Image: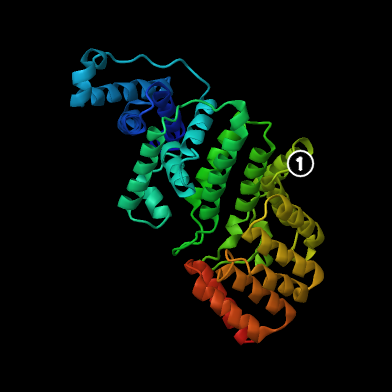
Amino acid sequence: MRATAQVDDLLRELAPQVLAALLRRYGDFDMCEDAVQEALLAAAIQWPRDGIPNNPKGWLITVAFRRRTERWRSDTARRRREEAAALIVPPDPEPVPAIDDTITLLLLCCHPSLTPVSQVALTLRAVGGLRTDEIARAFLVPDATMGQRISRAKKTIESRAAEFTMPPPAELSERMVAVLRVLYLIFNEGHTASSGPSLQRIDLTTEAIRLTRQVREGLPDDGEVAGLLALMLLTDARRPARVAPDGRLIPLSEQDRTLWDSGAIAEGVDLITDALSDSVIGPYQLQAAIAAVHDETPSFDKTDWPQILALYRLLDEIAPGPMVTLNRIVAVAMVHGAETGLGELAEAELDPVLARHHRVEAVRAHLLEFKGDLEAAQASYRLAARRTLSLPEQRYLDDRAARLECR
């Protein structure tokens, strides 16, 4: 690996740990993050030239502490109030387990006072180490808009006097729900972008998997953490077969399964098998179990749809949601026939959340095609294409409609 690439990877890994060290001591998000960014920049310049120091984390913490002190000195108001204290370079904090700091930082970024969108943005910025412009580009908003969103999130946390500490055990499980939801949202946006020209954003899926691995290291006995990591691995394993060389989306039924990542599948299957045998079953574990059934099936026509339907019904009971409903309806149709699936779809679309959603029409089109009503299926594919903001999905749906027109 090139020296610069090695340094970049190391800095991305250490950035949240260094930020955590400063936040643990000071708590002021903006000033601490600015100091860490300056330390990272200094390392990015010096380390490829001079070599990585023996204790890279300690080097970064020392530089970041000094940068923060320099910023503190330059603040006129603070200099007037605490000039003597500002002249002292604070010592390094007591060493703490890095993984605990990462989880604590994730919990802080997913503070309940923040909206889910702000939680995602702040997590990518503070824990993932992505630049503001990278996050803005991923979510197709202007840099200034994303910068304001992240700034407001940090100010909200500071205004609530949120401390950089692990919550008490009674609150930890509830707070971890928010952390896992944020990691899940990041992965999903990377796996199937909600809008724009690209179907996938590999930087987001890769970051979500990396962060979930870190949480897994810190909480090895948490079944839902294991389930989420398994779900990500089993889903991402199909990525090499999801998109044709020309950018066309390839549905699961037509993918070349020899292109799937067998190593990721094996790891995901082992994770979910152990989690289901040792833990209380949760929604991420069930989704991972469904993904495992698909990934272990040698061909689409041999898919165990009754097992998938049973898992979706259980998932619908413990964690109902619009996408769960649509996926369950597809499984119903595969087991009991398209007519039954269409009947359940008609009931499901009465939900305001699903009304006019492009995935409802996409599922309807699929079931109508399965039933043999090609004209109605073509119309639904066209309608679904008009409603989606994702250009690859739009192209796929239009292609399906055109294919039916030729039959």
**Above or below, 79 relative to 308:** above
Quarter of the figure with residue 228: top right
Q: Residue at x 75, y 62 (%)?
A: 299
Work out whether residue 3 can be spotted.
Answer: no
In front of the other: 193 or 320: 320
Q: Amino acid at mark 1?
A: Leu
Residue beneath disc 1: 276
Quarter of the figure with residue 175: top right
| x, y percent for residue 179 | 55, 40
**Above or below, 239 relative to 348:** above
Category of crowding for the residue at label 1, using alpha-carbon neighbours closer than 10 angstroms: few (below 14), some (14–19), many (at least 20): some
| x, y percent for residue 120 | 47, 46
| x, y percent for residue 182 | 53, 45
How many callouts does the rendering have?
1
- Quarter occupied by the C terminus: bottom right
In the displayed structure image, the side of residue 195 where residue 350 appears, left or right: right
Question: In terms of secondary structure, where does tag 1 sit?
Answer: helix
Q: Residue at x 68, y 44 (%)?
A: 268
Q: Residue at x 61, y 82 (%)?
A: 378
Q: Residue at x 63, y 60 (%)?
A: 323
Work out whether residue 358 can be spotted.
Answer: yes
In front of the other: 217 or 312: 312
| x, y percent for residue 17 | 45, 28
Quarter of the figure with residue 27: top left
